[in-house]
Image: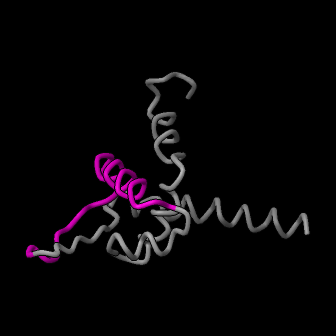
Amino acid sequence: MFEESCATRQALERLAAKWRILLIYALLDGPQRHARLRHRLPGITQKVLTETLRGMEADGLVSRQIVKQSAPQHVEYALTELGASLKEPLAAICAWAQEQTQVRA
């Protein structure tokens, strides 16, 4: 796991990028446009959102679909099967975090 070539390490490094997990959670609700995602993630800039979505698309976590070809073009982002497969592992992490919050309260 500590070797740079380890698949687990590479996956963790990709998912640990600042906005990726939150974007995955947002997209679990279904396909969404750029503006809706930006609204749901206060603090993310348009540039960072675009770069993050492009990186997630390159990693196979997100798909980009052009809904309207004519100007202004409408694009929707959705989780791929690979991206959606993160639902259960992320839910387990959230459940753990909630339990820890309750234990410490």
Q: Residue furthest left?
A: 70
Residue 15 place in picture, x, y as percent: 49, 48
Residue 95 place in picture, x, y as percent: 68, 67
On screen, residue 31 versus residue 9, left or right, reads left
47 drawn magenta = yes
Up/down of 4 relative to 66, above or below: above
Residue 7 place in picture, x, y as percent: 44, 33
Quadrant location of the N terminus? Answer: top right
- For image coordinates 38% across by 55% down, the residue present is 47
**Of residues 64 and 8, the one drawn nearer to the viewer in this rendering:** 64
Up/down of 82 relative to 38, above or below: above
62 drawn magenta = yes
Labels in figure, total = 0
Up/down of 101 relative to 16, above or below: below
**Of residues 82 and 46, the one drawn nearer to the viewer in this rendering:** 46
Residue 85 place in picture, x, y as percent: 42, 60
Q: Residue furthest right?
A: 105
- For image coordinates 48% across by 55% down, the residue present is 20
Which color scheme does this rendered protein use? one colour
- For image coordinates 56% across by 60% down, the residue present is 90
Quadrant location of the C terminus? Answer: bottom right
On screen, residue 66 versus residue 1, left or right, reads left
- For image coordinates 90% across by 64% down, the residue present is 104
On screen, residue 98 versus residue 17, left or right, reads right
Segment colored magenta? 44-70
